[in-house]
Image (cartoon, rainbow, N blue to C red):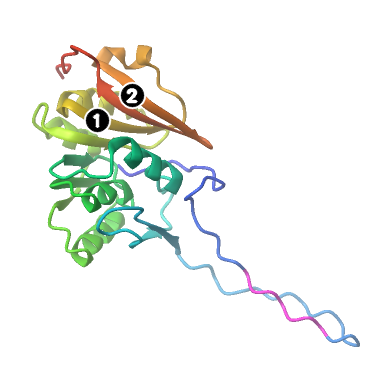
Amino acid sequence: MSRSTLRPESLPGGRLARAAKAAPTPAADSKPAKKTAGPAASKGSGEIRIIGGAWKRTRLPVAQRPGLRPTPDRVRETLFNWLGQDLTGWRCLDAFAGTGALGLEAASRGAVAVQLVESDPALVIQLHTLQQRLKATAVRVQRGDGVAALKQAAPASLDLILLDPPFEGGLYEPALQSAARAVAAGGFIYLEAPALWTDEQLAPWGLVVHRHLKAGAVHAHLLRLGVAAEPPAL
């Protein structure tokens, strides 16, 4: 499933509006020209850019899919500042890939294996196109369910898990449960949500908040396994 709940369009890094061309000024002795309908809006809604690493400034298309909400630039920049810019050798899974921005940021910084999981077939095609254009041999695109992919991951096998599920849909708890089992000791889980998740809420899965940022309506969390915490059984 993709990042499929609408985010307010005022968020940084949201959909780009296409500016309308100004109508020519009418002559002083003429009547104001009637407004005519402009051309139909394009189904492509803009683009975002990879912020750092080998593919820095590479443009990623943002298709006009229902509710597609790329992680804001400010949030992505902060996340990879938290993680450090060098992810050489890391194993990553982006469970609700959407545009692929989060997973591709990790691959751009040297991650050795990045799995992009997305349920929307049109977005999967776009991700395959990007993977081929970038010659991203470390990136694997998979059409499917993000929670199922996390359940299939070997225990403690991933250094970074990226979770940006639909804001509504009940996927947070199963995704966190499965991610807590799949993340390696010392690894990280990124969680994007419409509200703050506290240590008390995360305790059932042995997770704690390592870093937190609020940007507009988005709460970005960097989670880790708690000290001496055991990955929960599914």
**Which numbered disc flags the more N-terminal residue, 1 or 2?**
1
Please state the horizontal and vertical placement of residue 47, each as a whole percent of the image.
Answer: 42, 60
Question: Measuring 15% from the left and 41% from the top, which residue is drawn there?
Answer: 90
Q: Which residues are magenta?
A: 20-26
Q: Which residue is mark 2?
A: 210
Q: Is residue 24 magenta?
A: yes
Q: Which residue is mark 1?
A: 188
The disc labelled 1 sits on which kind of residue?
A: Phe
Q: Is residue 76 magenta?
A: no
Question: Does 74 sit left or right of 224 as displayed?
Answer: right
Question: Is residue 13 visible in the rendered structure shown here?
Answer: yes
Between marks 1 and 2, how big is the CA–CA gap? 9 Å
**Disc 1 and disc 2 in contact, CB within 8 angstroms:** yes
Element type at marker 2? strand
Q: Classify 222 as above or below 130.
A: above
Question: Measuring 27% from the left and 29% from the top, which residue is drawn there?
Answer: 175
Please state the horizontal and vertical placement of residue 226, each as a whole percent of the image.
Answer: 24, 16
